[in-house]
Image (spheres, grey):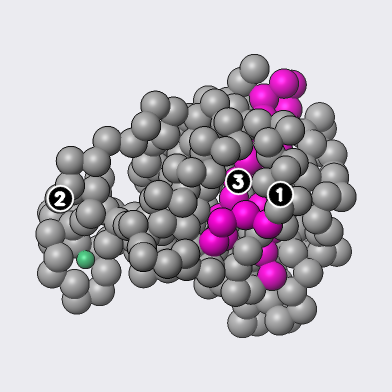
Amino acid sequence: MRLHFLGTGDCAGIPVYNCDCQVCSESRLKPALRRQGSGALLTAGPTRVLIDAGPPHLEQHLGSPPDLILLSHYHIDHVFGLFPLRWGCRDQPIPVFGPDDPAGCADLFKHPGILDFRAPLAPFVSHRHHGLEILPLPLNHSKPSLGFFLEYQGGRLAWLCDTGGLPEPTLTFLQRRPPQLMVLDCTLPPQEDDHPNHNDIERAIALHQRIGAQATCLTHVSHRLDLWLATTAFVPPAGVTIAADGMTLDIGP
Ligand SMILES: [Zn+2]
Ligand SMILES: [Zn+2]
Ligand SMILES: [Zn+2]
């Protein structure tokens, strides 16, 4: 499997509007430092899966339409790209799977265009698409949200965004089946108290260690975290990296 990050920022993205911090200022001059809303394209053999759809101009990055779309939840920074994409041209609608959230986001359900919103996914009920196994996992967030455990020919990927810590059943499952790559919410620099909806970097690293993932890539990064990383001598432990827009990672046995 191959995972290509389209967007790795939090809900504000980078640069943050009207922010003159070091990170936002530099990112206005250096596009490589910018972060769009959450989203990635997974290739598993013949199947292409869009996981979250935050970047506003998805059509510039996607090429041909994905075979299916997985949505972790219906916060705008995870679905924003679907608003223009739905009016694209395609004979066959694109199946879209997400959590049980009747409110969804704005008028996506009412005017789906080429999107085919399927029955909501249930935690721990798996689906198969051409050899790709998709298992939804519960997360801790302010809106109904699901993580995804994706398995293809011995490759195992966990996509866990957005979440503050992990619910016990998700943690136990991942400890039993450690993924080769875990993509994990890491929105904040170190906090005094655990945030209910997002991880700070210390909590994210503790989860990497408790789960025993071969590699963990931290995403949903805020300008506050990037600023902290740029101004401290912090070096992530072995196996932990920070995601960047445009980064590609291979996942295999
Ligand atoms: Zn988010
Ligand atoms: Zn800033
Ligand atoms: Zn969210």
Q: Residue furthest top?
A: 253
Q: Which one is in front in this view, the residue at disc 3 or the one at disc 1?
A: 1
Circles 2, 3 touching at the beta carbon (< 8 Å): no
**Secondary structure state at the residue bearing disc 3:** strand
Q: Which mark is residue 159?
A: 3
- Residue 186 position within the rendered picture, expressed as x and y whole percent measured from the top left: 44, 53
The residue nearer to you, when weighing 59 against 132, is 132
Left or right for 128, reference 137: right
- Residue 231 position within the rendered picture, expressed as x and y whole percent measured from the top left: 15, 50
At label 2, the amino acid type is Thr
At label 3, the amino acid type is Trp
Mark 2–mark 3 Cα distance, whole angstroms, equals: 28 Å
Q: Residue at x 80, y 55 (%)?
A: 123
Circles 2, 1 touching at the beta carbon (< 8 Å): no
Q: Pick the quarter of the image with the N terminus.
A: top right
Q: Is residue 144 at all visible to an observer of this figure? A: yes
Q: Which residue is mark 2?
A: 231
At label 1, the amino acid type is Thr
Q: Residue at x 62, y 77 (%)?
A: 105
The residue nearer to you, when weighing 26 against 204, is 204
Q: Residue at x 13, y 55 (%)?
A: 26
Q: Which residue range is magenta in the image?
A: 144-167
Q: Which residue is mark 1?
A: 170
Q: Which one is in front in this view, the residue at disc 2 or the one at disc 3?
A: 2
